[in-house]
Amino acid sequence: MTDAQETAADTSLRTTGGAPPDDGGSSETEAPIPLLEPREGIPPVVADAETLAQVVAAFAAGSGPVAVDAERASGYRYGQRAYLVQLRREGAGTALIDPVACPDLSGLGEALGGVEWVLHAATQDLPCLREIGMVPTLLFDTELAGRLAGFPRVGLGAMVEGVLGFVLEKGHSAVDWSTRPLPEAWLRYAALDVELLVDLRDALEKELDRQGKLEWAQQEFDAIASAPPPEPRRDPWRRTSGMHKVRRRRQLAVVRELWQTRDRIAQRRDISPGKVLSDAAIVEAALALPSNVHALGALNGFGPRTGRRQLEQWQAAVDRAKALTEAQLPQPGQPVAGPPPPRAWADKDPAAAARLSAARAGVSALAERIGMPQENLITPDTVRRVCWEPPSDVTAESVGAALTGYGARPWQVELVTPVLVEALSAKGE
């Protein structure tokens, strides 16, 4: 890193996109510095066991937090697996690891056990890192830290520019990271993503501490690190784009059959499902219920570029759905766990609707006062659940217990409980 880079990296938060200065006065913003090269250059990609062992030893011997990032091939390949893992730690430098050539990184994960991992938008990368054996016990999420600190823009590029004064080149974020060999420009981009991540972490920690929010952030980070892997989504086919147009059960069955057929093909070919058949085409076929291949081929999404064999496999899926008995057809909508949609509250339970309105207003005012998004102060689902079925005896203790039961962290319980007690206790007009 150059002297100019070191100076900027050590400075306090700039006013661009960040919190106001302590003294409330104006502050002249310096022009951001383009970050063009990693300080030690682009490291070679680790793609064999011997080199991986050397990297593991180097990072185990390093000091301080470790910056971690992962690149996926969303939109190109099936699933969300990692195709490149980037790390940087003081004393070890930067490493770029190919998890296709080195699919088991559990040794690296173990070597970094007890070390704080610094990630940006951790919940996006943790699933693919878990698949290759990398699971942190301690973490610092720079995106979430930015939200809690009240930054209006929390993308990595915006945070690095607003906090540290550097411009990151973001042109390769959506490329096909399954490409081999990876182009040098992509590797440079990947290395730069972890170049200043620890510097960003340090600056955000200072800002959170200044705002009195550091303990809140630590509770949030601990919750992410200790969260179990998410359960597989039930009936994922129901998330097909355009599903709101599909109302009849027979049509729903066509969506399900086409979605499941597409998913099997995509998994077998290791390709993004959207490249096999678009959601729009699935919905089009469900609405039309074509009787044969010719009718199917006339629909949008099944045009002349779709081969005869492909049309036959899609028509076979449609025919399977059409042959189901009434008892085998899917039910409209999904089983709802928890309260109904808020738009229905006024008719179903006017008192609950009044509680929710008061609670939302109180939470919004509190979030604005402490400078963070409402959804980070408390999840909207938690507020709805407490308002739909409040404790029989509304007290700070009972409301706090309800919030805790829905997964709220202690800092959230402390701040939000008085707001909800007031909303739940208010008498409707």
Image (tube, rainbow, N blue to C red):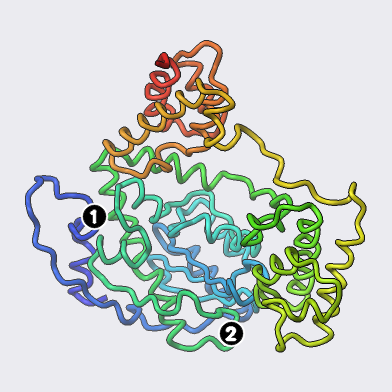
Residue 26, position in %: x, y? Answer: 7, 54
- Tell me, for residue 369, which label it has, or none: none
Q: Is residue 202 left or right of residue 96?
A: left
Q: In this view of the protein, which residue sits in the foreground, 404 or 104?
A: 404
Q: Is residue 297 left or right of residue 60?
A: right
Q: Reading the chain from its start, which is encountered first: label 1 or label 2?
A: 1
- When the figure is inspected, residue 1 is found, relative to residue 253, above or below; the finding is below
Q: Amino acid at mark 2?
A: Thr
Element marked by disc 1: loop
Q: Is residue 307 left or right of residue 42?
A: right
Q: In this view of the protein, which residue sits in the foreground, 7 or 115?
A: 7
Residue at far top of view: 393
Q: In this view of the protein, which residue sits in the foreground, 140 or 287?
A: 287
Q: Residue at x 57, y 89 (%)?
A: 181
Label 1, residues with CA under 10 Å away: few <14, some 14-19, many ≥20:
many
Q: Which residue is mark 1?
A: 18
**Distance from label 1 to label 2 (Cα)?**
37 Å
Q: Residue at x 74, y 85 (%)?
A: 306
Q: Residue at x 52, y 33 (%)?
A: 382
Q: Amino acid at mark 1?
A: Gly
- Tell me, for residue 179, which label it has, or none: 2
Q: Residue at x 88, y 67 (%)?
A: 319
Q: In this view of the protein, which residue sits in the foreground, 377 or 52?
A: 377
Residue 204, position in %: x, y? Answer: 30, 52
